Image (spheres, helix red, strand yellow):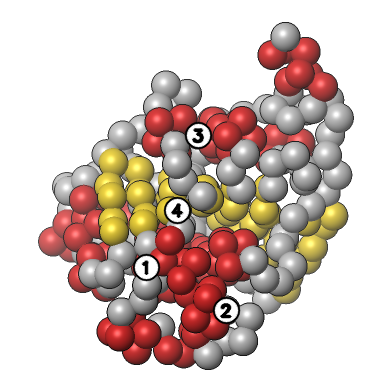
Amino acid sequence: MLSQEELARYDRQIMIPEIGREGQERLKKAKVFVAGAGGLGCPISIYLAVAGVGQIRIADNDRVDLSNLNRQILHWGKDIGRLKADSAGEKLFEINPHVKIETVSETIDEGNVFSLTDGFDVILDAMDNWAARYVLNRAALEKNIPFFHGAVRGLEGRAMTVIPGKTACLRCMYHGTPPPERSPVLGATPSVIAAIQVTEAVKYIVGVGDLLAGRLLIYDGMNMTFREFKLKKNPECDHCGRKRLRHDR
């Protein structure tokens, strides 16, 4: 049940006909896993918290660096050297004490991804490397958890929604694992993509609207354009196609 304070806090959101009080109750019951507390993870977590998502678990094993501060808006100068998960969790509690915030200072890998995401309703990708994204993609498919992908570079970003068993997955679209890089980023770019990811997650939890399912949305901040590409499942995908089925046997 929503308290009177929560009803007042989320009043403008509850006014949206497609959300209403029932939708807000669903958000309060939801459990969301956020993979990363960096450029994408910070605004993702903020928008989830202010939306009233009941439980947020953030996993990140990095520490705050001065070079993070142009875009990682939950981390401040006084946090340099701190674990990002701890820094983010502290601020999020202040933003909305009605939300249960869990922080995990671990590197997401094949050894812990299933325990980290166990019992959660959705997974939001806020990673900065493809190896971790593929680990999350496979876990989401095997656990039948919707996976909201986002990525940024410079003034460009992209987002897609993976519904296991129904849509193309991340591996259907990308092959191989690009080497890690220290990529350029304008601070506002992650916030644009994070807002899209959170909008998708909220819509899914509430059960309204059309999702970016089977679609890749690309944001070009330099020219201020959005483009959309339709995606098809790859029947030979080693995460969700026949190759996976043959491997599992």
Report how far apart the C-alphas of labels 3 and 2 lie in the structure: 33 Å
Work out whether mark 4 precedes mark 2 in sequence or the reverse, and give the earlier one: 2
Q: Which residue is drawn at 60% across and 47% down?
A: 147
User: Is residue 193 shown to the viewer in this render?
Assistant: no
Work out whether mark 1 precedes mark 4 in sequence or the reverse, and give the earlier one: 4
Q: Residue 246 falls in which quadrant of the image? A: top right
Image disc number at residue 107 = none
- Is label 2 in a helix, a strand or a loop? loop
Image disc number at residue 49 = 1
Q: Which residue is drawn at 74% across and 55% down?
A: 213
Q: What residue type is labelled 4?
A: Val
Is disc 2 surrounded by few (<14), some (14 to 19) or many (20+) residues within 10 Å? some
Q: Residue at x 27, y 69 (%)?
A: 98
The residue that mark 4 highlights is: 32
Report how far apart the C-alphas of labels 4 and 2 lie in the structure: 18 Å
Is disc 1 surrounded by few (<14), some (14 to 19) or many (20+) residues within 10 Å? many
Q: Do the residues labelled 3 and 1 touch (CB within 8 Å)?
A: no
Q: Where is residue 53 in the image (x, y as percent from the top left)?
A: 41, 65
Residue depth check, mark 1 versus mark 2: number of the one nearer the observer:
2
The residue that mark 2 highlights is: 19
Image disc number at residue 132 = 3
